Image (spheres, rainbow, N blue to C red):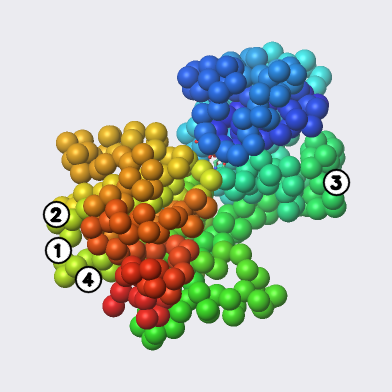
Amino acid sequence: MRVAVIGTGYVGLVAGACFADSGNSVVCMDIDPKKVEMLKRGEIPIYEPGLEDLVKRGNREGRLSFTTSFDEAVPSAEIIFLAVGTPPLPDGSPNTKYLESAAREIGRSLEKAPASESKIIVNKSTVPIGSHRVVAEWISAETSRPFEVVSNPEFLKEGSAVDDFFKPDRVVIGTENLEAFKKMADLYAPFVRQGNPIIHMDTVSAEITKYACNAFLATRITFMNELSRLCEATGGDIEEVRKGMATDIRIGKHFLYAGLGYGGSCFPKDVKALISTGDRYETPLEIVAAVDAANTKQKLRLIEAMTRYYGGALSGRTFAMWGLAFKPNTDDLREAPALEMVNALIEAGASVRVFDPVAMPNAKKYFREKLGSRLTSVHFSTSSYDAVADADAMILATEWNEFRHPDWKQVHLAMKHPLIFDGRNIFDPDKLTALGFKYFGIGRGKHAVT
Ligand SMILES: NC(=O)c1ccc[n+]([C@@H]2O[C@H](COP(=O)([O-])OP(=O)(O)OC[C@H]3O[C@@H](n4cnc5c(N)ncnc54)[C@H](O)[C@@H]3O)[C@@H](O)[C@H]2O)c1
């Protein structure tokens, strides 16, 4: 099939590369000329395991190309995916200006398509409920050519995006048009050979499903974070509680880890968007609103604990921070709890030695813009061991695999004080205590900061 993808970010690039890999002819379009030039050279602007090989193969075999021109992507495509960003506005509702601009450009380019061919326009971006109608209006304002707008929300996870796209738990296709559904199901058939379902539903339900999934997962995480506070107050250990819960098959084991709160480009923004949609339809979503508020507090919970531990005196201290990305296997810093913690520490007069296995270039850019003259309070370390040099304490902010089993003797020797604040509960408190460290985790009973 001939496919166009508009917006070549995390979602668009992964989708485009995976569709090309299954034999389709794919043109990925983006308004960012630097990104497109990089991709044409076979360079990948984001860190995503497996993606580089896929893009290079698609490029080499002529099935995947990149452009900044709508006219090179749209007129010849049978299916056109919209995968532009929908970041939050200050009131939490999604900013649809990129969506509108892309939809109108698609409309204008459709004028150059064969008059008889009806196109499928796919909302793959996470869009406000009812957007299929609005997108159709924007396109119709620019063209009278036939098209159908379909909702096909994306559920991939950064860090395992290629795997998730090739083996989705399910594919959701929202459309009232049976022909459009059949064509979309055909496009996705290579990815569901093991029998995972392609679920056909009405367009509005598909749009709601995306928000429902993210808000529900965010709720699970937040529930555990809340319980971890109760553990700290009562002497329980959230890790034991988690095991007891996760083995109940009605509950399951995923997204039950207490920590520093959720971040990333999706959960925070989608939770806020769902709340604002509820308000717009005069259906307040009270659980979701509570999740959002609790998560905002959670991101600074460890810093509050540290402030208590040091009797308020963080100024003049040096802290090591292991991990900056909002989760492992990605260089994405959007809404990462680590960034807020670094900012709070610097605000309190401390300095921070940061290290992340892949997010350092993005971190340098972020802190340069954010901190200005206070940038001297951040040391960009070359390794996790460099980060702990002469540190008063180490904060584990992202659970990268390589942090799980460090050479603790080397860490101990390097630190000024052998003190660990484990924001993701990945270390064994008894082991670290036996090695001479003082250990604090999140909700870890006797190892909690009181
Ligand atoms: N990142 C994820 O894990 C994920 C997962 C599921 C769904 N989503 C949703 O998918 C959408 C895209 O997310 P992302 O993380 O890929 O965003 P992103 O910011 O990484 O990429 C968006 C891209 O769109 C481009 N763009 C903006 N306006 C454009 C226009 N008018 N025409 C062409 N290109 C344009 C930008 O230059 C950018 O490259 C969002 O709605 C997001 O909520 C993201």
Name the amino acid, label 4: Arg
Name the amino acid, label 3: Arg
Q: Which mark is residue 251?
A: none
Q: Are marks 1 and 4 in contact (CB under 8 Å)?
A: no
Q: Could you say whether the residue bearing mark 1 is in a helix, strand or loop?
A: loop
Q: Position of residue 226 (x, y in %)?
A: 43, 73
Name the amino acid, label 1: Ala
| Residue drawn where x is 33% and y is 35% of the image | 364
| Residue drawn where x is 53% and y is 16% of the image | 37
Q: Quadrant of the C terminus?
A: bottom left
Measure the C-alpha gap from mark 1 to mark 2: 8 Å
Q: Could you say whether the residue bearing mark 2 is in a helix, strand or loop?
A: loop
Q: Which residue is mark 1?
A: 313
Q: Which residue is mark 3?
A: 193
Q: Which corner quadrant of the image does residue 49 belong to?
A: top right
Q: Which residue is mark 4?
A: 308
Task: Please report whichever mark, 1 or 4, sits nearer to the chain's N-terminal start.
Answer: 4
Q: Position of residue 286 (x, y in %)?
A: 47, 69
| Residue drawn where x is 45% and y is 50% of the image | 326
Q: Of discs 2 and 4, which sits in the foreground? A: 2
Measure the C-alpha gap from mark 1 to mark 4: 9 Å
